[in-house]
Amino acid sequence: MNQADDRPPYSGPRSIWSAVLVIAIGVALLLSNFDIGFPWLPLHNAWALFILLGAVPALICAVRRYRAQGRIDGAVFHDLCTAAIVVTVALFFLCDLSWQRWWPVFVIYGGVCMLAPRGRWQRVR
């Protein structure tokens, strides 16, 4: 059996609350598409704030790995690059940046991520 088969399926309160959060975000976005406004979201592109949630798991993994290793290894560096890319995408939408002008930033990110030391990247629990 490989390591992925040894892990229990997601269950418990944490996964339930995560699912409820994702459903609530989806409902809020759907209502927004039907012009049902939210006074606490005055920006026309406030939905892009939800993209930032995608950076949280990568940052959590980076912190856990750093604490376990006591140094920045390839996995920590990779997770930090992943979080930076997700944050950059969110900023593109929030700041109304032109994809046509700024897309080379992602080529640069790709090159920076290639600098990460090679090795087996394992998730730290």
Image: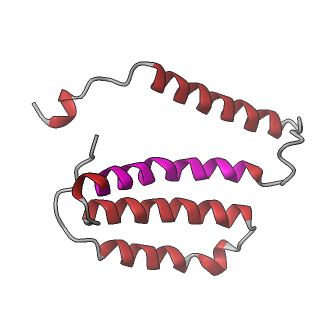
Picture residue at 35% right of the left edge, 71% below the top = 113
Q: Which quadrant of the figure contains the N terminus?
A: top left
Which secondary structure is most common in the magenta stretch? helix
Q: Observer-nearest residue: 36 or 63?
A: 63
Horizontal and vertical percent position of residue 121: 22, 55
Closer to the camera in the image, 22 or 99: 22
Residue 53, magenta (yes or no): yes
Give me the residue at 16% from left, 63% from top: 119
Q: Kindly indicate the quadrant of the structure image that contains residue 81.
A: bottom left
At which x and y percent is residue 50?
64, 47
Q: Is 98 rendered above or below residue 38?
A: below
Specify the quadrant that holds the C terminus: top left
Q: Residue, x 87% and y 50% (percent of image)?
A: 42
Q: Residue furthest left?
A: 1
Tell me, what colour scheme is on the image?
secondary structure
* As drawn, 37 above or below 53: above
Total number of numbered labels?
0
Query: In the rendered structure, does residue 8 fall within the stretch colored magenta?
Result: no
Whole-percent x, y for residue 89 in the image: 59, 62
Query: Which percent across, then down, holds residue 44?
Result: 84, 54
Identified at 66% across, 66% down, the residue is: 92
- Stretch in magenta: 47-66
